[in-house]
Image (tube, rainbow, N blue to C red):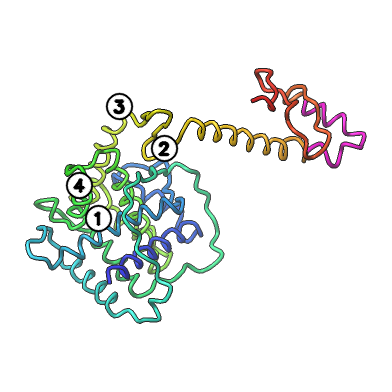
């Protein structure tokens, strides 16, 4: 059942990202959802584009939060977090839907992502966002996915009047912050990317929640949810996440990192990777060869060698490239070496 719930969460994230990439969002919502302070103007829009591996790792963090809640809800001596009425109803609906999921709906379900302790990619919201016109309808949510989305929005909408660990989300994030091997807390370098994962995916799901009743009025609905539980002014889980992440990033970028390179005879170790000097030299030579092949194919031969070599424009083309790149001899055919192409130091490519 937990696998079904985690797979549902992955689908919700996929559809939320689809809403951004396919242009189903109101453009001004990109600025509203990125706000940390309700009255402060945001200059950069929210960016939902992520590499697939990054998205998988971000989902992994939310899977662990859900697994924590799933396993601690009914055990004796469980953590002391408290669910409010909306959260209990959403959780019960979500869990019941997962229990009653028909077999045909289970067909094609993927496996839950396993734990991966590798560092998450940094959150980057500074890429340019170009509005696009939707070319197809947004993928509809299944019933279980609607319950999943409602549960996560309910987790975020939790006023913390007393202890902030009354929140199930913050209780789970505290458990995730434990380094089980060292039996201590994780370092800011390892923990702050997990908080970034929650921030990124939470913003995407809030926008998707607002779009469930259509685009008309979506900006106003997003504004309402942002002001209610997505800014630092309110005593909500996101306020704690924002402040803790900011503190962690301050430590991360002002503390000298420990050495990552070590030697063992002729073997070099960098983080979890080990290689010999011979392998390193082979890698460098391979990289140079790949660069040479790209230059040979894209910079020289396709421009001057095929269509213009036997025409009167040949000398003009060569002169243009010589003026831009320096003097060199044009290779005699498409498979020629760049050994005669000079580098800035005067050493031919063939000897690099």
Which dot, 1 or 4, sits closer to the camera?
A: 4
- Which residue, given by chain and number where applicable, does mark 2 sit on? 274
Secondary element under disc 3, as helix, strand or loop, is: loop
Name the disc covering residue 21, or none: none
- Which residue, given by chain and number where applicable, does mark 4 sit on? 178
- Which residue, given by chain and number where applicable, does mark 1 sit on? 228
Which dot, 3 or 1, sits closer to the camera?
A: 3
Name the disc covering residue 256, or none: 3
What is the spatial separation of the Cα atoms under label 3 and label 2, in whole angstroms?
23 Å
Residue 287 lies left or right of residue 218; in this view the side is right
User: Alpha-carbon neighbours of circle 3 within 10 Å: few (<14), some, or many (≥20)?
Assistant: few
What is the spatial separation of the Cα atoms under label 2 and label 4, in whole angstroms?
27 Å
Pointer 3 with pointer 1, Cβ within 8 A: no
Question: Looking at the rendering, in which quadrant would you find the N terminus?
Answer: bottom left
Residue 134 lies left or right of residue 337; in this view the side is left
Pointer 3 with pointer 2, Cβ within 8 A: no
Which dot, 3 or 2, sits closer to the camera?
A: 2
Question: Looking at the rendering, in which quadrant would you find the C terminus?
Answer: top right
User: Alpha-carbon neighbours of circle 4 within 10 Å: few (<14), some, or many (≥20)?
Assistant: some
Q: Residue extending furthest front?
A: 265
Which dot, 2 or 4, sits closer to the camera?
A: 2
The residue that appears at 40% across and 71% down in the rendered structure is 109
Secondary element under disc 4, as helix, strand or loop, is: strand
């Amino acid at each position: 059942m937990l696998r079904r719930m985690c797979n549902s969460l992955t689908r919700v994230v996929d559809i939320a990202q689809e809403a951004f990439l396919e242009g189903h969002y109101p453009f001004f919502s990109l600025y509203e959802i990125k706000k940390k302070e309700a009255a402060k103007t945001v200059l950069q829009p929210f960016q939902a584009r992520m590499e697939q591996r990054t998205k998988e790792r971000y989902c992994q963090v939310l899977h662990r939060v859900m697994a924590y809640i799933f396993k601690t809800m009914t055990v004796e001596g469980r953590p002391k977090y408290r669910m409010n009425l909306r959260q209990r109803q959403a959780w019960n609906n979500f869990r019941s839907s997962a229990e009653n999921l028909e077999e045909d709906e289970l067909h094609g379900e993927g496996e839950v992502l396993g734990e991966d302790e590798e560092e998450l990619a940094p959150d980057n919201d500074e890429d340019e966002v170009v509005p696009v016109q939707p070319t197809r309808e947004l993928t509809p949510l299944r019933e279980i996915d609607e319950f999943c989305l409602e549960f996560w929005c309910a987790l975020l909408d939790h006023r913390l009047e007393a202890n902030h660990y009354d929140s199930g989300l913050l209780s789970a994030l505290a458990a995730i912050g434990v380094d089980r091997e060292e039996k201590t807390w994780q370092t800011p370098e390892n923990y702050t990317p997990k908080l970034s994962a929650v921030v990124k995916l939470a913003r995407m799901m809030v926008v998707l929640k607002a779009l469930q009743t259509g685009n008309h009025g979506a900006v106003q609905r997003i504004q309402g949810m942002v002001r209610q539980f997505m800014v630092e002014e309110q005593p909500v889980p996101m306020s704690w996440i924002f402040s803790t992440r900011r503190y962690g990033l301050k430590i991360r970028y002002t503390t000298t990192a420990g050495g990552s390179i070590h030697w063992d005879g002729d073997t070099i170790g960098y983080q979890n990777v080990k290689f010999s000097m011979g392998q390193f030299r082979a890698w460098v030579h391979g990289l140079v060869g790949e660069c040479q092949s790209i230059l040979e194919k894209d910079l020289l031969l396709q421009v001057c060698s095929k269509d213009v070599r036997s025409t009167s424009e040949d000398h003009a083309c060569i002169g243009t490239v010589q003026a831009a790149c320096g003097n060199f001899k044009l290779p005699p055919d498409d498979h020629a070496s760049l050994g005669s192409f000079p580098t800035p130091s005067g050493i031919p490519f063939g000897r690099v």
